[in-house]
Image (tube, rainbow, N blue to C red):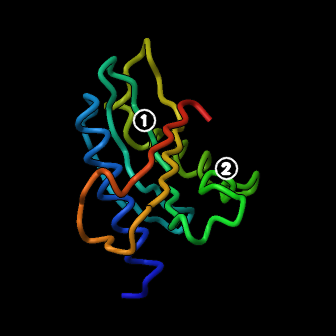
Amino acid sequence: MTKKSELGKAGEDFACEYLIKNGYKIIDRNFREKWGELDIVAISKDKTLIFVEVKTMQESNLQGLGPEDQMTAAKIKKFKKAASLYAGHNQNLINDKKGWRLDLIALEVSSAELLTKDENNFRVKHYQNI
């Protein structure tokens, strides 16, 4: 496993823990199809279906940009398409009154010790309904 993929996995693991602590229920992870990938699929406290993209960067590599800056218009379009297709095939997960939304969790990691799941190593920015 490369350092970049280790960083990504550590970020996604932390994001799941963060979501669970905040009342979300994780439905699916790393869902892959030919039309795209979804990092996390969850249900929020208010029963909204949430698709979460996780972007993680080590603070030493930020160089003035945050992890959220990796979310280009093209990536948002692909993310939206993947979420739309997933939602279409899983209508039973969608609350008629709440629908679904796209969220971004941007994580900055302060330590190279990625496998220590110490929440003090992560700075979380949760953007809802991107």
Q: Identify the residue at image location x=59%, y=51%.
A: 79
Q: Which residue is mark 1?
A: 50
x, y percent for residue 46: 34, 17
Residue 17, compared with residue 118, is above or below; it is above
Percent of width and height locating residue 77: 70, 50
**Quadrant of the frame with the N terminus:** bottom left
Amino acid under disc 1: Ile
Residue 84, position in %: x, y? 55, 42
Instruction: Report the residue marked by disc 2.
Output: 76
**Element carrying mark 1:** strand
Residue sitting at the far right: 73
Q: Amino acid at mark 2?
A: Ile
| 1 or 2: tag closer to the N-terminus | 1
Q: Foreground residue, 14 or 121?
A: 121
Q: Nearer the viewer, residue 54 or 112?
A: 112
Q: Secondary structure at mark 2?
A: helix
Q: In which quadrant of the rendered view does residue 29 lie?
A: bottom left
Q: Which mark is residue 66?
A: none
